Amino acid sequence: MNIKCLNIMLLLKKNFLEKGIKRNNNALIIPFGKCIIRNNGELQLNGNLLVNSNEKTRNRTGRSSIIKIDSNGKIIVNKRFNIYYGADIVVFAGGEMILNGGFFNSNVTVRCRNRVQIGPDVAISHGVLIQDYDGHALFFTSADGKIDSPDNSAPITIGEHVLIAANVTILKGVKIGDGAIIGAGSVVTHDIPAHTLAVGIPAKVIREGVDWK
């Protein structure tokens, strides 16, 4: 931890002066460098949340991270979680993101309108996108002229000790099992079983019985 780069003013404001942050077990939100943390919902800290922790400079030319929680949105940190620079995280109204331990590497984007749950000891690499909704309502017309608009959001669950490689996209309704590995550049649109290696667009299992460290 680079103590010299701690954003002391933001640390004091978020942990001790601002409403909407619930701290248990002496947990803290620990910001580094240039961070933007806008909380109009609820941030529940049961473990420490480090934000921008690999930032190496205090000046305004350094990399930043953004966390935005809309009204009635919630982030729950159950175990120490580390968010590196370039993060762009939005929890929309009614959404809930649960972090149970691990880290987001640089330039991770999360859009949570429903529910995103990250299991313990998860490693999520550079440039990953996690989005639990389509972004826009989609309409389909059947042969008989009936117009259908399916639900455009569904929860995402990432299990324990999962490795997500660089530039992966994880879309709505997906469950990734414990110990799974998702190869670089993959697009995950369906469930991935535990201890499998999945790659491709869309991601498909190519090997079973895998593990990583």
Image: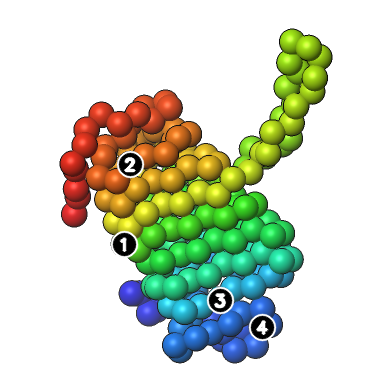
Numbered badge on residue 18: 4
Query: Reading the chain from its start, which is encountered first: label 3 or label 4?
Result: 4
Query: Reading the chain from its start, which is encountered first: label 3 or label 1?
Result: 3
Q: Is residue 212 left or right of residue 47?
A: left
Answer above or below: position of 101 versus 46. Answer: above
Residue 209 coordinates in the image, percent (x, y): 18, 41
Give the residue at x 55% y 61%: 97
Query: Reading the chain from its start, which is encountered first: label 1 or label 2?
Result: 1
Query: Reading the chain from its start, which is encountered first: label 3 or label 2?
Result: 3
Residues at circles 4 and 1 in contact by the CB criterion of under 8 Å: no
In-front residue for pair 178/11: 178
| Pair 1/2: label in front | 2
* Mark 2, secondary structure of its residue: loop
Numbered badge on residue 193: 2
- Amino acid type for the residue under numbered disc 1: Asp
Q: Which residue is mark 3?
A: 44
| Pair 4/2: label in front | 2
* Mark 4, secondary structure of its residue: loop
Give the residue at x 48% y 42%: 174
- Amino acid type for the residue under numbered disc 2: Pro
- Amino acid type for the residue under numbered disc 4: Glu
* Mark 3, secondary structure of its residue: strand
Direction top: furthest residue: 143
Residue 150 coordinates in the image, percent (x, y): 69, 33
Label 2 environment density (alpha carbons within 10 Å; few <14, some 14–19, many ≥20): some
Give the residue at x 43% y 78%: 47
